[in-house]
Amino acid sequence: MGKIAEFISKETDIKNESKRMTVLIRKICLSFLALSVFQLLLFAFLLHSGRGITLWAFTIAADFLTFYISYHSTKKVVLSVFISQKILWITASMLLIGWDGGFQFFLILLIILYSFGEAGYNNKKLIFNFFCFVLFLFFLLFFKGKTGLIDVTGMERVIETSATLVFCVNVAFVATSFSKASQEVEEKIVNYNKQLEIEAGEDALTGLKNRRNTNAFIRSLVSEHDTFSICICDIDFFKKVNDTYGHEFGDEVLKAIADVFKKKQSEGVYASRWGGEEFLLIFPGLNGDDAYVKTFAIRDEIKNITVPNGDVSISVTMTYGLSEYSLHHTMEENIREIDEKLYMGKESGRDRIIY
């Protein structure tokens, strides 16, 4: 079964050609072949009708031809051949068997198939749909309640049931194929939007949250009236690092520090890149004293970082401004206070925590 499915799903010989519609037509052709073989046996051994045998023999040959060219032609050619031969088949079936055979309803299948198979919204679809509508009305006016050229007395229900079954199977093929395609596109759009959301909330270099995401997180903590503390930290003499070793090495230093902060996230610390060489840490649920203890441990880890640069390894320090967030002040006022503490730490020698 696996090899049969692989054969049916095989690409065409035409380059850059979508196979979805071609594979769908192959499946429909196989279902029609099953119907044709059944009807051929029915007309040969039960109805003994030469005309019926001829009709279904030609139908089998036409479906085999469509199936064959699907491996060597474009989707447009395969679709055109399939629709053309099915319109002829429906017309011949109406003449020979009549309205009760149920073959007129396959016009609906052709409308659905052409609507999905022909790209875009264009006049061709309108013309084809109108043609099928007129043809259906013609069958309704001239064949409704009348018998065909072949006497199928006693077998009307069998013929109609088999045709209806194949019609339903083919509609299911079409619906499944194109609903799957629609779901795949929808899933790609959803995943792409999720990726955009992630990128919009993360710093591209370090992978930490960015300022926009951080501001939103602070507002959420304020709205819940939680106790929390904030620390803004800045790499000491980072300009000198960039000037001496280059900006690429400076980026490596930023990523190394960010890796330390990422590890702290498992301990409940919210870490973000605030801008440039500045980082912002949030300690949810911790007052200033408890946050100071955490910050002190982080300071020691940062000092122990060594970033390799050729034959040497470089270490850096950071200065920290820390404050317990005051719900009586605005976010801007709280951030300004922490910035001032950071500035005090820079002015008083760096590599320290001002709380």
Image: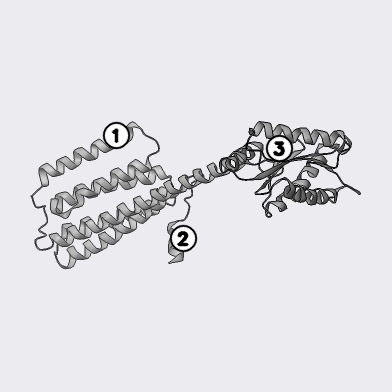
In whole angstroms, how far apart are the C-alphas of marks 3 and 1? 57 Å
| Residue 65 percent coordinates (x, y) | 35, 53
Q: Which three-letter amino acid code belongs to the residue tagged 3?
A: Trp
Asked whether the residues under the numbered discs 1 and 2 touch, taking CB atoms below 8 Å apart as contact, a structural biologist would say no
Residue at image coords 59%, 40%:
222
Quarter that holds the C terminus: top right
Q: Which mark is residue 6?
A: 2
Q: Which mark is residue 13?
A: none
| Residue 264 percent coordinates (x, y) | 71, 52
| Mark 2, other Cα within 10 Å: few <14 / some 14–19 / many ≥20 | few
**Residue 269 horizontal side relative to residue 353, left or right:** left
In whole angstroms, how far apart are the C-alphas of marks 3 and 2? 54 Å
Closer to the camera in the image, 63 or 122: 122
Residue of label 3: 274
Q: Tell me, yes or no, if residue 239 can be seen here.
A: no
Q: Which three-letter amino acid code belongs to the residue tagged 1?
A: Leu
| Residue 26 percent coordinates (x, y) | 37, 54
- Callout 1 secondary element: helix
Mark closer to the observer (3, 2):
3
Residue at image coords 29%, 34%:
126
Closer to the camera in the image, 52 or 343: 343
Q: Earlier in the sequence, mark 3 or mark 1?
A: 1
- Callout 3 secondary element: strand
Residue of label 1: 126
